[in-house]
Image (tube, rainbow, N blue to C red):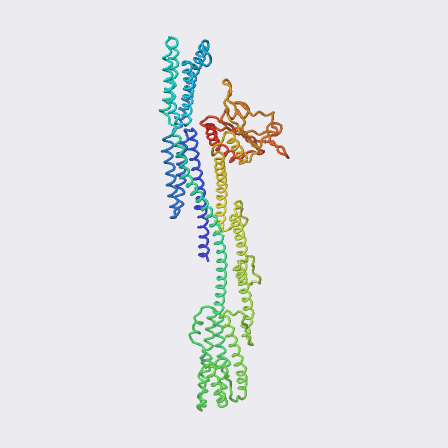
Amino acid sequence: MGIIVYTLNARVIKDALEVSQDDVPSVILSLSLLDKLDDMDVNVLKYMTGKVEEPADFEANRRAFLTSFEELAQIETKPEEVKMRLKIESLFSEYANTTDKQIFNRYDPKVEQWAKKQADSVVHQYGAALKKRLKELTKAALKETRLTTTSRETAAQPEVHIYLVLMDKAGELEINLTKYVAGITKEKQEFASNAAEFETFFNKLKALKNKQAEIATLNEILSLYTQLKKGAEEIFRRYNPETKKEALATLYRLEQEYFGQLEQILDSLAAEKKQDALTATRDITLIVTEMTYTMMAVILLAIIAGLAVSIFLARSITEPLALIVRGSNLLVAGDVALTDIDKREIDKITRRQDEMGDIGRAFEAQANYFKAVIEDIVQVSIELAKGNLRVTPQAEYRGDFAQIKKALETSLSNQRQVIEDIVRVSQGLAEGNLRVMPKAEYQGDFAQIKQAMEVALPALQQVIKDIVRVYQGLATGNLSVMPLGEYRGDIAQIKNALDKALPHQQQVIEDIIQVSQGLAKGNLHVTPQIEYRGDFVQIKNALETALSALRQVIEDIVQVSQGLAEGNLNITHQAEYRGDFIQIKHALVTAALKLSNATAQNAQQDWLKTGQTQLNDQIRGDHDIVALAKNIISFLTTYVEAQVGLFYLLQESKHRDSRPYLQVIATYAYTANDNIPNEFLLGEGLVGQAALEQKTLTRTHTPEEYTHIIQSGLAKAVPHHVLITPFLYEKTVKGVIELGSSTTLTDIQREFIEQSMPSLGIAVNTAQSR
């Protein structure tokens, strides 16, 4: 029984360990790999927006990915798992190496930042000065010419025309340079063409000027132009916008060819291991059920074996006793030789050192004495049969047997006939013929012998047949057999013992069968019904204790397993587990906890990825800035379950001496209010402050501090919680997002907003460039 329970328990522990050491760790590691892969993709995206520190973070996430991957490799050792692991390793290696070589090594955001800063410096320092000086000279030339000519003639003057062309080309040179650093590479050729035309017209102007003051002015113009051209050529030499385009194209290709496959494989692995964990949990339930049935079967077999041992012990007593009774009956019947009994059977009894051995030896001594006396009587009888009346008894006659000797000695003539008849009866008994009866005429007291023999022989015959029938029934498992013969004297005790023992044993076995059949049908509420006496009480107590404990454990395991199968990961154990069942409880609790954590993390990651994908769908394509802003603010507000949203765009001042300002260009569920401005300078209000500090601000309002800005036909609402966050492009603020909610945004909602800001900066910058 112990081996069977140990084997089944080992299977349960094996499945539980497989859940806790294989399936659940695989799910967690797969989710960790997905998280690190997403972080690496975010690192590349941030690098493309100008964050030069991202390659170091990319490498750290790469090492973390490889560490988790090595842990996963130690768990996943099956051939199909090794094949999948090799594919993941190949895809990841290609993704990471290509990113290093074709993005980080080829494209340097610092060069682009330098180019833009340098272009801005050249344009403002030399380009603006050049245009200003040309504008002044143009106005002077126009003024001078108008004094001597008409308006039409003035416009046709070569000097005025040259000034206008030079001023136009100077402006185009600024535009060419600005567009080039913005990513339009063909502007380099346009710059060269415009520069050549500028120089051509400048030479024409130079041919018209011969005064010292005019030559000085031309030299000033030439110096400004030369500095502008020199600065542009340095930018052309050090910065090539195509490197960024190629890097973006490489990033797009990596996401399509490798990143997507990696995500799909890891998602599939996590889902597969989660399903394996649930399957192993159901297997544990089945094995525990099998263990219960097996233990019940073993208990039943033990009970049957106990009964068999009891019957064997009973037979070890009853069989010798029956042999002695049979021998006694033979002696009573006159068979002193005990011809119907094997001498070896008597020897087995006399060799025993217990009470049965004492009885056997006493019986053997008595039988031998009877035999000696009878043989002597037979010898006398034989001699009488021969007519030898002088024959005398030779054996030692003790006790009352001495009277026989005396009677023999005094009544030999009368005994002849009796002895002959007794010999005949004795010979019949010796041959096992219990139907033999005395036939001679017995006179005097010998008549009593005849009467006793005629009564005893049929009675013994009936008793022996009845005992044989009962024991044959017991030997074949028939507990319903009962003694039917008439037992008299001491033999009646045998009948009384059989009458009491047989019905009680029958009731016990029938009750055990009833309990076992109930367990076989899955009825854990079955209980022993009859009264158990003696040592059988221990069987009843053991059955009741085992049934109660097993019923509680199995019902609790079924309840927990059903909860896990239905996705209820917060279900707890109610029953008390003892012994090896404690390991099952620990395994189920550990599996449920790890599955709950993994499921929650997976749901959050899925929510973030889904939001990023849907946001990319909203900003993809060619949109004007207002339509793009409306798509963005509508999506962000609804996705994070806020109630109102505003999109502020940073606008350049319309006046030279004014500062840039933030203007509302798109809203969601917002009702305009004359008391609330829709424009903010940098540093003005929470919106301007968030833009100035380039960080997220949050605020909780009371009803008195805020006005009703969300209105419908039925109600007005106040956003008690406000989140304001700027979005940047290459460390430059492009605008601000303001979201109002009746409840505080969760950490995962805020993380989604922060992750979305770089994409908004790129999208807005792209829309403004078109």
Q: Is residue 68 left or right of residue 533?
A: left
Q: Quadrant of residue 89?
A: top left
Task: State the residue at coordinates (44%, 53%).
Answer: 11
Q: In the rendered image, is residue 539 in sight?
A: yes
Name the one closer to the observer, 213 or 452. 213
Q: Quadrant of residue 349?
A: bottom left
Instruction: Give the residue furthest to the right.
Output: 714
Q: Quadrant of residue 115?
A: top left
* Residue 386 percent location from the top left of the image: 43, 90
Instruction: Give the residue furthest to the top.
Output: 212
Q: In the rendered image, is residue 682 in sight?
A: no
Q: Is residue 669 above or below residue 206?
A: below
Instruction: Give the residue furthest to the bottom.
Output: 387
Name the one closer to the observer, 529 or 73. 73
Task: State the residue at coordinates (52%, 46%).
Answer: 567
* Residue 675 percent location from the top left of the image: 60, 25
Task: State the residue at coordinates (47%, 13%).
Answer: 151
* Residue 759 percent location from the top left of the image: 47, 32
Query: For the image shown, how many numbered marks are present on the structure?
Result: 0
Q: Is residue 287 above or below residue 399?
A: above
Name the one closer to the observer, 384 or 138. 138
Name the one closer to the observer, 558 or 299. 558
* Residue 591 percent location from the top left of the image: 48, 46
